[in-house]
Each structure stands twice: as C-alpha cells, then as structure tokens.
Image (tube, grey):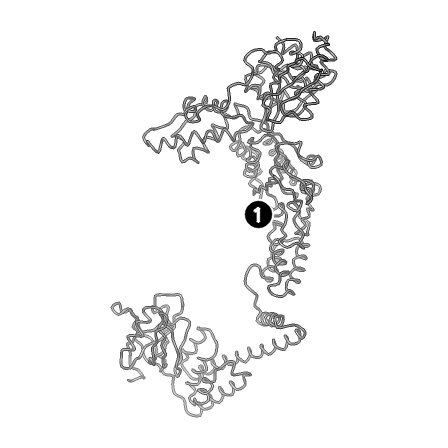
Amino acid sequence: MNEGAQTLSLPLLPTRSFVLFPSTIQPIEAGRVFSINAIRAAHLKADSLIFVSSQKNPNDEVVNMNNLYLTGVLCRIVSITDKNNLLRVRVDVVERVKINSLFFDAENQYYVAEGIVSKLPEVDSITNDSIVRALVEKLNNLPNVLNILSKTTLNMVNKTKDAVALSYILASSLSASTEEKQKILECEDIQELMERVVILLSGEQTKAQIEENIATTVRESAEKNQKEYFLREKLKAIKKELGETSDGSNSPESILEKLENNPYPENIKKKVKAELQKYEMMPQGSLEGALIQSYLDVLMSIPWWEKTTDDEDLKHVEEVLNADHFGLEIPKKRIIEYLAIKKLTGNLKSPILCFYGPPGTGKTSLGKSIAHALGRKFFKASLGGISDEAEIRGHRRTYVGSLPGRIIQGMRKAGVTNPVFLLDEVDKLASSYKGDPASALLEVLDPEQNNQFNDNYVEEPYDLSDVLFICTANYLENIPGPLRDRLELIQLSSYTEIEKLHIAKEHLIVKQVELNGLKIDQVEFTDEAIKYIIRSYTREAGVRELERKIASCLRKVAVNFVKNPDIGKTVVDVDKVREFLLTPPFEDTQKEKEPQIGVVTGLAYTEYGGDILPIEVNYFKGKGSLILTGHLGDVMKESASIALDYVKANADLFGIDADVFANNDIHIHVPEGAVPKDGPSAGIAMACAIISCLSKHPVSPDVAMTGEVTLRGQALPIGGLREKSLAALRSGIKKIVVPKENKKDVDELPVEVKNSLEIIYMTKVEDAVKECFI
C-alpha cells in the first residue's frame, strides 16, 4: 500500500466526542447500526482497515461532509467483542487521513469515505531529538505524573524516540476538549504539534499547582474538622479558584444575584444575606440547613414590589361588573367610588369591604368579578372552621413543619402586592386553646396597621395596604365587635322574584346550557316556567337551588336530545317543569286560607332569607301558666312573656275578662317545632294572637306583622325588613304592619314589593290590632 498519496475507499466509523491519534491503540464502543455494520464490513477484509473520524455535533444521527471533521485517522481492527448490544473493538491507529468524499451505502447500511493518507513532513534527527527531550522534560516537571498518565503510557513515552509519535501519545492521554484534540490532529508541521502538546502539559501543571494550593488552604482552615468539613472546604476552594458557581435557582449564588438585581426592601436583603451566611456554615444535608433553605424559598417567593395596574376606565369597569352580576348596585357603586378617588388622588389605601347576607346571593362570585373588572389577581382564603391563630399569623420557625399563615401564602400564590383577597366566611371562625383567629385578623384588616403586618414565620414586616380585602359573612352577629368595627359593611340582601328571573335568564341558563353540552338555540325557558320554579321548587334568598333546578331540567332535555337528535328546539314551560321536576315541594302560598281566631302571621329573618311565621295561641282550664312550644330561644320566650303581661295589664282595653288569666293556661305555639327560632321581632304578633284568642276576634289571613313589643305595648324597630317583606309577597300576603321607626328601611325596599304590598306603620300594639282584626 502506498501510504503517501494513494486514495483509499473504506468503511467509515463516525465517533462522538472522541478523537484518535496515530501511534496509539484505542478501544471503541459502537452502538449505532451503521457503525456496527462498518466495523463488521472492514473486519471481513484481509487488511481490516477502516476510517475513523469524529462528528462535530455528537447529537447528529445523520453523518455528512458538513458535520464531520474531515481530518481523521486510518485504523486497523485488532479485535472485536459483542457485549450488551454494543460492539467493542480495539483499533491500531496507523496514520492521519484527509477525507475527500462521503456517501451512504444503502445496500450494506454503512457509510463509505474516500481519503488520502496525510503524514506530517519528516524532520532531521537533531530536531527530532530536541523535541523529544523538551516534551519529556516538561512531563517530568509535572508533580504526581502518575495521577495524569498510566504506567503503560509512561512506558510507551520512555520507549518512543519519534517526536511525532510521542506528541500523539501524549495528546491522546491528556485531558482536553474534543475541539482542542481535533486541532492537534489537524496540525500540519511538527513545530505546531509540539506547541499544542506543550500547552496541554502546561495546563496539567497549572491544575496540579492549583490542587496543591487548594490542599494547603484546606489543611490550614480545617485542622479541627472531620472529613466531611474538609471536603466541603475543598469544594469551596475549588469553586473560588475556578470562578464557578453551582447551578440551580436555589443556590446561594443565584439567590444573591436575584437579590441584587431586584428592588427588594433593604431589611429583606439584610435578612437573606444573614440566613445565607448561616446556611453556608451548615453541614450538607443537615436538618437546620433544610429549614433555612425552606425559609429562604418562602422569603424570596413573596411579592415585595410586583403589582398589577388597575383598570381606571370607570365605564369599562361598570360594564364588566354589570355583565357578571345583575343588581347588587351598592357594592358596584362602592368599587366605582374607590377607583374614582384613587384616580384623582393618585394614591389611596384599599378599603376593607365586608359583603354580608344570606347564602347564594353572590358574595364570593362578586369578589371574583371585582378582581376581573379591576384587572387584578384574585385569591380566596376559606376561613370557615379555623380555630388556630397560626393559620392567620403563621407558625414560628422553631417548630418542625412550620409554614407562613394563610395571608402570606395567599400573597405568594397571587404573586403581586395588590391582589383582590377574599376572606370567605369570616363569621364561621372559631376560637380554641390555640388562640382566636378573629383577633389575629384585626391587624390584617386595619388600614392603619396592615402596612406593617407581622407573620410569625416570615419575621419581617409585610405591607398589605395595597391589598383589596373583601370579607364575606352570613351573620353579622357572629363577627366579633372589634373585627366588625374595621369592616365597611355592605349588605347583599335576598333577591326578589324579578331579580331571580333576570339572573336565571341572563346568567344561570346560559351557564348550565353550556355545562350540560347543549347549545343555546336548542332550549328555551319561558318566563312563567322560571317563575314557577322559583315559587314552587325553591325557598331561598339566593339562586343556588334555582340553578340546581334549572340544571335538572336541562339534563332531562339533554337525555331527550341524545335519544332523538331530530326533536328540534325544546321549549320548557310550566307543564315541562312539572314533568321534569315532579311534585313541587312547596305550596304557592303558606298563609292561612280563612280568618282564624288566635292565629297571627308573623315575619321571620333566617340565614336563608325571610319566611312567614304563623303564631298560634290557645287557652284551656289551668292554673294561669304560660306554655311555649316550637323550639323557641330565650329571647323569643321573653318576648312571649312580655306580650302576655302587656295583655294582662290592658285586658279591659281589649274587652278581655281579667279572670281568664288566673283560671286558664295559655299555650303559644310556633309551628315547625323542629326548627330553632329566636329573636324579639315576633313580640307584636304574639300580643295580637293572645288578644285574638282571648277576645274571640278572628284575624285576617292576608295581614302579616313584625315588631318588638315592650311592657307598655310600644312597637320597637326590627331588622331584615327586606327579606321579611319578600317572604310576605312570596306567600301571598297583601298587607304588612311594621314599626314606624322602620320607615327608612321601607324606602329601600324593591319597587315590586312596594307596589304589591300595603305597608302600614304602627307605634303600639293597638295599631296592629286595628289592622289585623276583622
């Protein structure tokens, strides 16, 4: 074989991140199909010759002239071994080659290359000997040379007298990148080759010197420490010497970089740096180190400066609020006022709002709608049943598994300093031996204090003044006084039938049609059907049960549509509602059909809205006792006693024989005995029922009344008039009698209530008696 200029055509073995040098014997592992095929094809030939060259990108699966180094080597295969789907081959590297062309042999499934053997120019013996001496001397200057070269390689070095071969042996044995080794292989003269090998040897010498310096540093700083501490210090010294930092967003270097590149408050920067200093002194894997790491994660993930920009287009905000909710004018106006003043002043502390009212009236969903309208992030924290103060303020870091409180956790999830933060069901907070969460909320919900909120876990003050807090509650009475004093109370009262009709048509039906897989043009509810569902299938202040009944109807429509896709549009009328929902659980009216003696219709306010409350009185021979039944509370029992004592004192005024009280027992019963009842607002109704029973005067079933009674017969004002009047209207009552001091509340009643009910004002029991007796 003429190795000077002869063109060879041989199988090609492309390698990944591996450069071979002449005058060496190297093992290669091949796993790709075309590599294995090339090796087997070459081995079948008598000379067992094969080209080997490295790929520029080790991830490339297809080889071509553009991604292959064109300077490779000519090898002779020494041996082949199969092992675990890999082909292990030992090759004797003969000489450099220059690859001229490359193609893929589709029949035999391997690459074939054409190349010319390319030897370096020969040098005279004097030059050759001087290069060999220089390389050997440089090698001998390396400390701990056995840590760099194996004994076999050292023997080869000592026996080799050829400068080119010696250079290639050293280049193959020293650590360097693929690119650096390829440049050595591509060297065209002995001088350049020697210089590059010397650079590699110098690098090894520098590394050895650094290792020695590191070892010295470690010995001085770790005299009293065990092996683990020694290794850590060595690692720190290596990083410092090489100028490297550890990867990952949680590494101390990345935390410090994030701290310096962002506008964190100065106290937070100081705190983080102090914790990092402690963290770096901890042994790797220690519990204390893990706790500090968790604390730093929390501290860095809390939003300290990020905020969203409010939408200050008042018309657009109004449009969004009106699109999401029907009615609820008072809370909508309050949000518009807040935005208007904020726009004029440029800065305004966020109000602390509290929406209270019966369930299902849209308190929680209104909070989401406000966030949507303002363009703010929204977070909801459910506080119902919480009895641990640490749920609000967080646990101290001394406890294992400690966490921030719900306020800080909510801010982390929101990711901004000015979200809409909904505190749901604040009236359901409980207190226990673990503390009182309601008291912990005092700091959160006080605009004068919450710019310095302290969480036990965070240990640094946090500014909550930009947060728009919205609380929700069903019963104001269950919210402690100091907490209630910090809230701007906005009542979300029961919906009227007209409002429920609009909500069903504009929101509930559209939502449920989509959820049940139907299209809006496939089903239609008549107004009469919706009203029939409201009156006969629901008894609620809100619209949750109404939505469930609409969903139930739509499920029946969906079943019919699946069974018969050609049925066309389904119109849900009153008859369809009866078919879908079966027997109505409620009557159209609950009032008495005929005038009754000793039966007066009262009005009650419950957490579900308003309801009418029939009060029955009877008497019979006895010892003058008062019997009360109907699961009455203490306040209601007192009202019954006051009403009876007033009637006793004014028996002549109402034409009642005074002896009847001494010789008879009087029994007052409020039906639905399993339902607890309490409050003073049934006092007037009880007095009228007692008078009707004892004077034998029948009471009109079309009249209902509410008001607290005193021993002098005065009618005191009551609460919940909107809900009570709506219940009266829903039950077919035509006239309601209310205390005169409630006139201000009457002005705020819905228009349909004022148009449909006759409202009579009273100052004392006699006024109610005149209106209800026939």
Q: Position of residue 153 (x, y in %)?
A: 45, 84
How crowded pointer 1 is (Cα within 10 Å; few <14, some 14-19, many 20+) is rated as: some
- Viewer-closest of 722 and 582: 582
SS class of the residue under badge 1? helix
Residue 625 higher or lower than 447, as above or below? above
Q: Tell me which residue sits at (47%, 79%) in the image.
A: 174
Residue found at the very far front of the displayed protein: 622
Location of the C terminus by quadrant is: top right
- Amino acid found under the numbered disc labelled 1: Lys
Count of residue discs: 1
Nearest the viewer among 560 and 212 is 560
Tell me residue 84's x, y (percent).
37, 70
Q: Residue furthest left?
A: 107
Quarter of the rendering occupied by the N terminus:
bottom left
Direction bottom: furthest residue:
126
Residue 24: where, in percent of width, then height? Answer: 40, 82
Q: Which residue is mark 1?
A: 413
Whether residue 612 sits left or right of residue 115 in the image: it is right
Give the percent coordinates (x, y) of residue 388.
65, 44
Residue at image location 57% in from the left, 47% down from the top: 413
Please say whether residue 286 is visible from this viewpoint: yes
State whether residue 348 appears in this view: no
The part of the image, by quadrant, that contains residue 106 is bottom left
Using residue 199 as the reference point, say whether residue 567 is left or right of it.
left
Residue 444 appears in which quarter of the rendering? top right
